[in-house]
Image (cartoon, rainbow, N blue to C red):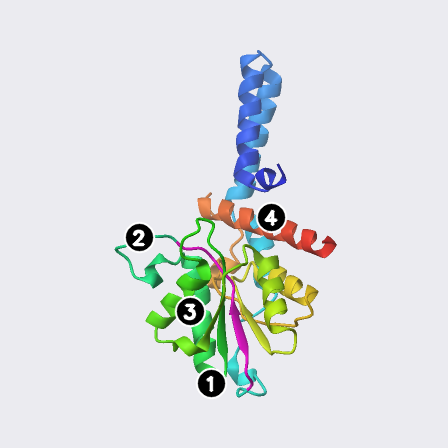
Amino acid sequence: MIKFLLDPFNILWLFVLTGLVAYLFKKRAIAGAVFIISGGWFLLISTPLVPSFLLNSLEDQYEPVSVAAIADVQAPYHIVVLGGGHGFDDRLPPNSLLSLNALGRLNEGIRLHRQLPNSMLVLSGYSSSGRTTQAEMLRNAAILLGVEEDKLLIQKEPGNTYEEAEVYAERFGTGQPVIVVTSAAHMPRAVIVFEKFGITPLPSPTNYRLKGSWKRKKLSLPALNNIDNLRISLSEHAAIIREKFR
């Protein structure tokens, strides 16, 4: 139920449905008020003022790692790339089977790996279908993109961020220097979760949804991407609260 209500579009449909029911039962004044509220809610969620504010509050917390700022580039970093989804299609190579989210994370991981000569890529994620796991698909794509297989470690068990950190800590402990790669909006939660297991990661976010002038835009015509930005922001903020009380 909470997940349902965290989607602003679902709330819009609840308003509309309530208005229609009131109209059918001849409650014209109530119906009119609800439809006005529905219109206001639509403008609130589909224009960038609130969605961009909430999303920026997540994406602006960390910046991508600059290798030039790392004191010891020879350190044996583990670059942990969190899973982001994939599909199956026999016509397509592994990189095309990754979701755009997962591909962006892998690209960032490879960027760092190529500049840190003693690093290992740790690729993470399970399969809900029982077929090729996210970790295996990321490994296949990384090899296709030129990463040496002996520089890749995979963890196929985790199904969510908490499990990814838990499995990593159980397998490798807390003594390894770690860089975590995930989407910018997801990074604050990922850092909190890894710290729960005694790991202080160096965050390197990617997949920024708001860039350049879009970060400052407060007014525009209604657009579905604003609704999506708000949905992601609400979901992440709610998940952060949950992790703090877990």
**Whole-number angstrom distance, CA of label 3 to CA of label 1:** 16 Å
Query: At label 2, which amino acid type do we have?
Result: Asp
Q: Which residues are magenta?
A: 75-86
- What number is the disc on residue 117? 1
Q: Earlier in the sequence, mark 1 or mark 2?
A: 2
User: What x and y, as percent, mark residue 31?
Assistant: 58, 20
Residue annotated with mark 4 = 234
Query: Mark 2 or mark 4: which is in front?
Result: 2
Query: Mark 3 or mark 1: which is in front?
Result: 1
- What number is the disc on residue 89? 2
Query: At label 3, which amino acid type do we have?
Result: Asn
In the image, taking residue 74 as reference, residue 241 lies left or right, namely: right
Check the picture and name the quadrant holding the C terminus. bottom right
Q: Secondary structure at mark 3?
A: helix
**Whole-number angstrom distance, CA of label 2 to CA of label 4:** 32 Å
Q: Earlier in the sequence, mark 2 or mark 4?
A: 2
Q: Secondary structure at mark 1?
A: loop
